[in-house]
Image: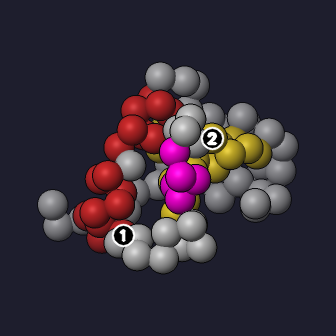
């Protein structure tokens, strides 16, 4: 896990969130300072992960984060044309 938030640079309150009961292939790295999150995909858990399809497939993670205090702070550059 990062020691510093990629969104605000804070070193405090960095955590990981995931959908309960999921494979752990996708997690949200959260920051309590800026209330932002970055979606991470772990290729070690899903070597066949595909950047566009899996970002959409893990929409449940985005919905889980939206229900809490966090907002997505990054975007998937592979989805720019859509």
Question: Residue at the spot x=49%, y=69% of the render?
Answer: 46
Reading the chain from its start, which is encountered first: label 1 or label 2?
A: 2
Main SS class of the magenta portion in the image: loop
Q: Residues within 10 Å of mark 1 (few under 14, many from 20)?
A: few
Question: Residue at the spot x=47%, y=23% of the render?
Answer: 67
**Location of the N terminus (image quadrant):** bottom right
Residue 7 drawn in magenta = no
Report the front residue among 48 and 10: 48
**Numbered tag placed on residue 17 in the rendering:** 2
Where residue 71 appears, x then y in whole percent? 49, 36
| Above or below 68: residue 45 | below
Where is residue 33, by image quadrant?
Answer: top right
Q: Is residue 62 visible?
A: yes
Where is residue 43, by image quadrant?
Answer: bottom right
Question: Residue at the spot x=72%, y=35% of the render?
Answer: 32
Residue range corresponding to the magenta coloring: 22-26
Report the front residue among 1 and 50: 50
Q: Is residue 36 visible?
A: no
Disc 1: which residue: 51
> How many marks overall?
2
Where residue 27 appears, x then y in whole percent? 57, 51
| Residue furthest to the bottom | 47
**Local SS, label 2:** strand
């Amino acid at each position: 896990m990062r020691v510093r938030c990629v969104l605000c640079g804070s070193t405090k309150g960095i955590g990981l969130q995931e959908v309960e009961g999921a494979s752990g292939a996708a997690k949200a790295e959260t920051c309590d300072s800026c209330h932002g999150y970055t979606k991470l995909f772990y290729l070690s858990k899903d070597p066949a992960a595909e950047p566009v399809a899996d970002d959409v497939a893990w929409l449940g993670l985005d919905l889980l984060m939206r229900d809490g205090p966090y907002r997505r702070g990054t975007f998937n550059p592979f989805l720019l044309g859509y």
